Amino acid sequence: MLTGKQKSYLRSEAHHLQPIFQIGKGGLTEPIIKQIEEALEARELIKVSILQNCEEDKSEIAERLEEAGIDVAQVIGKILVLYKESKEKKRIVLP
């Protein structure tokens, strides 16, 4: 679980990032979760956008990602900022 200070730091680090995943009509599926985990292993911090046609609520998606062991640093509009510490390519040092 991230502290407020850590979330704030991650938000500032993610500011310049572009979303690399889009969750659409199919919602959050297992293959998408697996791809997000792989991207997080490589990058540690990513943005995911939720499209207009997504039938799931953004808070439900955030909850399901947290259940999968992924930290949600921020939900802003239809964008989620996700963080997971990399096992092999650790670059981000949290305060």
Image (cartoon, rainbow, N blue to C red):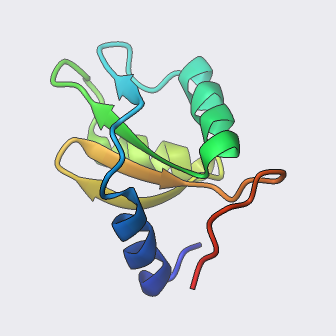
Q: Quadrant of residue 40?
A: top right
x then y, percent, for residue 24: 31, 18
Q: Quadrant of residue 91?
A: bottom right
x then y, percent, for residue 37: 65, 37
x then y, percent, for residue 73: 43, 63
Asked whether, in this view, residue 59 is left or right of residue 84, the answer is: left
56 above or below 88? above
13 above or below 42? below
Please state the total of marks drawn on the protein image. 0
* Quadrant including the N terminus: bottom right
Residue name at image x 50 percent, y 82 percent: 3
73 above or below 21? below
Residue name at image x 28 percent, y 32 percent: 50
Residue name at image x 36 percent, y 47 percent: 17
x then y, percent, for residue 49: 30, 34
For this orientation, the residue located farthest to the right is 88
5 above or below 56? below
* Quadrant including the C terminus: bottom right
Residue name at image x 69 percent, y 59 percent: 85
Q: Quadrant of residue 71?
A: bottom right
Asked whether, in this view, residue 44 is left or right of residue 53, the answer is: right
